[in-house]
Amino acid sequence: MAKKATPQPYTKPDQVQIRGNQILSILRQKWVALTPEERVRQEYLRILMEEYGYKAEQIEEEVSVTGRGSGDARADFLIWRTPDAKQRQEHALIVIECKADNVTISLKDYAQGANYAQYEHARFFVTHNHRETKYWKVDDTRRMPNYDEIANIPHADATDKDINELLARLKVFKEDEFAKLLHECHNVIRNREKLDPAAAFDEIAKILFVKVYVERELRAKRSRKNLFSVEYLDDQLGKHPLNTLFGQTKEAYADDKIFESDEEIRLKPATGREIVKLLERYNLSETSEDIKGIAFERFLGRTFRGEIGQFFTPRTIVEFMIRMVEPLEGDVICDPASGSGGFLIRFFEIVRQQILADADHQYQEFKIKVEGDKKLSPDKKATMLREKFDAIQSTLDHDKPGSRLWKLANRFIYGTDANDRMARTSKMNMIMHGDGHGGVHHHDGFLNVNGIFEGRFDIVLTNPPFGANVEPSDVVHEPYATVSREAGKRYAEEYGDLYTEALSRVRVAAGKPIASLFELPKGNGTEKERDKRAKSSKIKTEILFIERCLSLLKPGGRLGIVLPEGVFNNPSLTYVREFCENRAFIRAVVSLPQETFFSSGASVKASLLFLQKFTEKEQADFDAKDAKANAEVKAKHADAIAREITRLEDAIAAAKEVRDTEKRKKLHKELADYEKRMAETIAKETRALLKERFPYAIFLYEAEKVGITATGEQDQNELVPNDNQPPGITKTCLELFQEFRRNPKPFFLTEATE
């Protein structure tokens, strides 16, 4: 039996009382086993008392919400409006549900909290662990789901008016609302300061980061008013308080290299104050990363259209593409044209969720085993659970070098963009989403830099710029191959000879056309034609990106790339398709509607290409079969070719003897044409024979609804499972592809019978 506690003096949340394997529950007035779950609960109780001002007399712990004696639904805490209300056994005002830190709070947990609140007729409920706290209002006049996210719960001294205002504000904010507000701020700056859209965006971004920094600091200090407001700004000292705060923000983000050391907020104080005022209705420290991030992305999409709209891939397309390549912990990803960072952000989110879910699974599995061991004392169980929990948590410490989340953010995510503003914006975007920005660089995506070089990535996902050409005048500049001694040493130690060799290739190419580093600019045709084309080195940007992406992949790596549809059906680009076939399995081609990228300022009809690079064994098998097929086809035509060439050469010799120059020229052309024609015939027959001997199925799909309209609004989506699938769609494209990968035969049998 737990020993009853002596009443203790009030302490702060980080000073909960622990004694050996026990923690003090001041509400139950006893020492209880110090489990990870109990610690989360007791620390949050301290927050409720310290920050919100609730007294022990108006809180009850571990209480049934379905009736006394029932164990079906027990809330961690119930909070009454007043101690008297609790004494009178009125319905509680707030229900609190705490979860262990390893648990990512899910929709199921929200529904559970709402059910508890429904049973209790409470007006609010909270879901909490150290990772996130969410607040909800409950409307018991509605059927389930009858809860909406709000900014906070009432403090103990809240009046009826305060509570009603809190309920009326309804939610922290939705992505669209915040995106519209950011756009409103953007227009204020453009109109008052006469800045172009990109320059106005830069100023918004600076103030946003000041807001994130200030509210994070205020929250860390457990300030009741943890909001960056005009009132807070006016309380600062100096002539330009916003720039003073920006200086502190730059220092906080110095390692991320987002802002230049001499950079300032270049707005009149009155304009800056107006932006702070517009933004003060939202508290970013209390807003989940996914909402902040999505809102920031939507603002980006509205701000940058047309000229640099290519940098924004619709979120529905990002989601589909990344689900198609099935990212896992340990995969290293690269986007060599990262734009706003959409692919890298979603990769980070998905893998982070996998890591947290795995950590929770490890702990829960261990917990079941320990709690089921009847030989262990309660104290021993608590010790074992706490030690296991702490060990798992240490692997999740984002700031601890070598931890799972640290490696995810700092060693597994890489991107580069040739546009300086977009490289910086993608870093900002990733920070808004929760991190993973350390590997993003301002650099030419065709060239090696730092951790981005050939043969290194498990996944490459990209939406490269379309339509432009890489010209002969686009050369490798010396700075692209220059790194500081400190950086060079670090990367050499981290990546070894692969990095040294990769950087050497760029140094050797200094001054040469970028396209000269690639094979595809040579195209197809005769050797003479290929040499001539290689010297001109002019090629479509998207074509060069195909080769770059394949080069970046490890053997067995997966590629998803957005390409204009002409790459798939233009006869003149057959050599590009064969280049891919010679190096990778074509896993899927998904055709998108014409209007998919209209909202990003692009009108080209596009398709998605998914490749899986051959392993070394598969490449050797392919090359051997290719060589054998080629030898067989050449042997088949050898006699006929020899006879025809002999005939033409004899005719040329005869024309030369009689000095018939005109006839000799004509015969030379006929010989060249014949050799070219037969080379094409041999290549075509070799390819056909190779496909018979190296067969595999390719998934083809033509999508009509992909979740976005021509104006950028949400639409029905047949690509991935979601709540807005088109009528009649029983399986989405992703689900069909997954079935196809397991067993492609039924798809082809069905097609054949139809």
Image: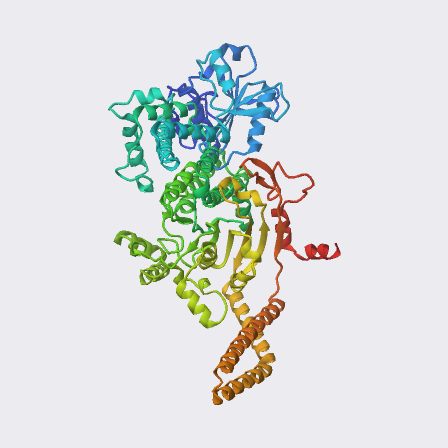
Residue furthest right as drawn: 753
Q: Report if residue 65 is visible in the image.
A: no
Residue 421 pos. (x, y %):
37, 42
* Quarter of the figure that contains the C terminus: bottom right
Q: Where, by quadrant of the figure, is residue 452 drawn?
A: bottom left
Residue furthest left as drawn: 238
Q: Is residue 266 above or below residue 538?
A: above
Q: Is residue 221 left or right of residue 238?
A: right
Q: Is residue 434 above or below residue 612?
A: above
Q: Report if residue 665 is visible in the image.
A: yes
Residue furthest bottom as drawn: 657
Observer-nearest of 615 and 510: 510
The residue at 42%/36% (across/down) is: 432
Observer-nearest of 101 and 513: 513
Q: Where, by quadrant of the figure, is residue 749 drawn?
A: bottom right
Residue 743 pos. (x, y %):
65, 56
Residue 647 pos. (x, y %):
56, 85
Q: Where, by quadrant of the figure, is residue 420 drawn?
A: top left
Q: Is residue 710 left or right of residue 425?
A: right
Q: Is residue 94 above or below residue 638?
A: above
